[in-house]
Amino acid sequence: MALLEIQNLKKYFKNIKAVDDISFSVNKGDILGLLGPNGAGKSTTISMIATLTAPDSGVIRFRGEDISQNPKAIQQSLGLVPQEIALYPNLSGLENLQFWGRAYDLSGALLKKRIHEVSEVIGIKERLKDRVKKYSGGMQRRLNIGAALLHNPEFIIMDEPTVGIDPQSRNHILDTVKALASKDTTIIYTSHYMEEVEILCERVCIMDAGKIIAAGTKDEITSSLGGGCELTLKLAKPDAALCEKISKLTGVSKLSAEDDMVFIVADDGDKVTHAVLELVGKSNAPLLSFDTKKASLETVFLNLTGRALRD
Ligand SMILES: Nc1ncnc2c1ncn2[C@@H]1O[C@H](COP(=O)(O)OP(=O)(O)O)[C@@H](O)[C@H]1O
Ligand SMILES: [Mg+2]
């Protein structure tokens, strides 16, 4: 049985279909990446899982039980790291952690121990006594994560935890997620950064305009696109006839051209590459550069929506 199961979930705000009939599930110990551009519906989805927003329709089950029937069960097991930082700037890091710890019914020696452990994990120990308003954005993010870890939750949801922070804090956060995952914690990691999701998550749901437009492991998603490999050619001049021939090659599933640049999605492997280069060699458009790489989730998104993830 899946730890979390979401069925036909919907949430509309007037005419905005924020979440438009999505279904997915998360198994215990999984790290699921929820990837999508701004406005895709990620935070609204999370807010419903966290029982902060009521769905218009659909069911969310936690350990098989409808969360609207028993919200406490998921509330107690969940550590939510919200997209907006939820800290008191005039209190110290320590006081903030004490506040959040009490909100989770922790007190006394146990709270002290957990604050000690968590501040080790998020790497803010030396700054615990400083007021949060003196922290960098990255440190505030880390403290925000720490607050959600105090009660040692078995299920963690992080909503875009690395937006707008320094690379050092970002790496620290990614390492924290990896460490949590190795402890068998179940995680939903939301981001519009494709690379992070590729590094961290075994399974990915790609969201756009309230819908899940692709789901599965990274390999399943890229192969559903019709290929595992991307070729980029720069020609000395545009050549429509050549593009036409390439697009008909076996193993080539997508081709788009922009002036002298040609983008190809194809099967993984040397065969297609050789065939493409052979056709280019026979054409009268000299090749200026050639690049090949494994297809990324970014390519999938681009192909499914015609837009880049970061638009
Ligand atoms: N409380 C709200 N009232 C009206 N519109 C909302 C509200 N919350 C979200 N939306 C809209 O729903 C859509 C999805 O938003 P959101 O879930 O925040 O997306 P994401 O987290 O993927 O950026 C957006 O168009 C957003 O403007
Ligand atoms: Mg959001």
Image (cartoon, rainbow, N blue to C red):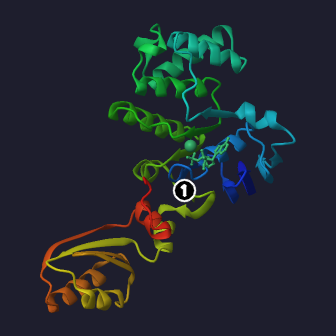
In-front residue for pair 189/120: 189
Q: Residue at x 53, y 36 (%)?
A: 180
Which quadrant, please, contains the N terminus? Answer: bottom right
Above-or-below relation of 112 to 297:
above
Q: Which residue is drawn at 13% across and 78% down?
A: 236
Identify residue for label 1.
203
Above-or-below relation of 111 to 213:
above
Mark yes or no: residue 1 visible.
no
**In the image, is 120 to the left or to the right of 14?**
left
- Label 1 secondary element: strand
Identify residue type, mark 1: Arg
Q: Where is residue 110 shown, x and y percent of the image? A: 65, 13
The extreme front residue here reads 15
Q: Where is residue 286 shown, x and y percent of the image? A: 12, 82
Total marks drawn? 1
In-front residue for pair 170/13: 13
Q: Where is residue 216 shown, x and y percent of the image? A: 56, 63
The extreme right residue here reads 69
Which quarter of the figure has residue 265? Answer: bottom left
